[in-house]
């Protein structure tokens, strides 16, 4: 009985300590709106060129996730918002960019970034 209890405690401790924490910093929806609409932001669509060509946010550049590491120098000193289809590749891109000292934010999906842009356009018209 004592051994089973100890094993249960050990297993629970292992499960709690082995969980990977998310390395991306949470930015509230209000802040991401401000960042997306700031004049000094670079919007980066990390999807493949075919997906980018099918539709993306206004003024976005296409740097596929597989090429993001090769474009670090071009992004240094810039405020960057990355996005993709579902947010998974964007999460990975943010981690890579931040590890390389770039101010990077997760815009999640291209539709989210485009909606933020459209929302702002409606307010200014």
Image (tube, grey):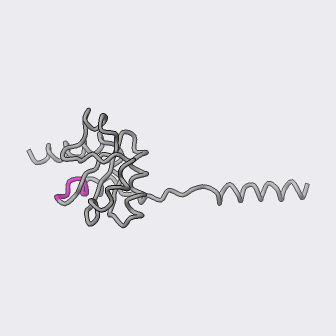
Please give the name of the residue rendered at 19% of the width and 44% of the height, measured from the top-left corner.
Answer: 58
Farthest residue, direction right:
1
Pick the residue in front: 50 or 8: 50
Pick the residue in front: 31 or 89: 89
Residue 95 on the magenta span: no
Is 86 situated left or right of 21 in this image? left
Please give the name of the residue rendered at 31% of the width and 35% of the height, measured from the top-left corner.
Answer: 51
Numbered-mark total? 0
User: Where does the image place residue 87, in percent across and percent down from the top left?
Assistant: 40, 44
Pick the quarter of the image with the C terminus.
top left
Please give the name of the residue rendered at 28% of the width and 60% of the height, measured from the top-left corner.
Answer: 75
Farthest residue, direction left:
125
Farthest residue, direction front:
70
For residue 114, which quarter of the picture?
top left
User: Where does the image place residue 98, in percent across and percent down from the top left?
Assistant: 39, 62
User: Where does the image place residue 25, in percent across and percent down from the top left?
Assistant: 42, 60
Residue 37 on the magenta span: yes
Q: What range is drawn magenta here?
A: 34-39
For residue 17, which quarter of the picture?
bottom right
User: Where does the image place residue 39, in percent across and percent down from the top left?
Assistant: 16, 58
Pick the residue in front: 93 or 21: 93
Is 83 situated left or right of 39 in this image? right
Is 2 situated left or right of 47 in this image? right
């Amino acid at each position: 009985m004592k051994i089973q209890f100890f094993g249960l405690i050990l297993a629970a401790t292992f499960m709690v300590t082995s969980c990977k924490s998310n390395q991306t910093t949470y930015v509230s929806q209000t802040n991401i709106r401000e960042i997306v609409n700031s004049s000094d932001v670079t919007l980066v669509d990390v999807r493949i060129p075919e997906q980018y060509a099918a539709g993306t946010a206004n003024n976005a550049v296409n740097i596929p996730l597989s090429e993001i590491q090769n474009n670090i120098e071009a992004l240094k000193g810039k405020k960057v918002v990355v996005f993709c289809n579902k947010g998974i590749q964007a999460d990975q891109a943010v981690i890579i960019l931040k590890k390389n000292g770039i101010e990077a934010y997760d815009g999640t999906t291209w539709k989210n970034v485009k909606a933020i842009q459209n929302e702002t356009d409606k307010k200014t018209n």
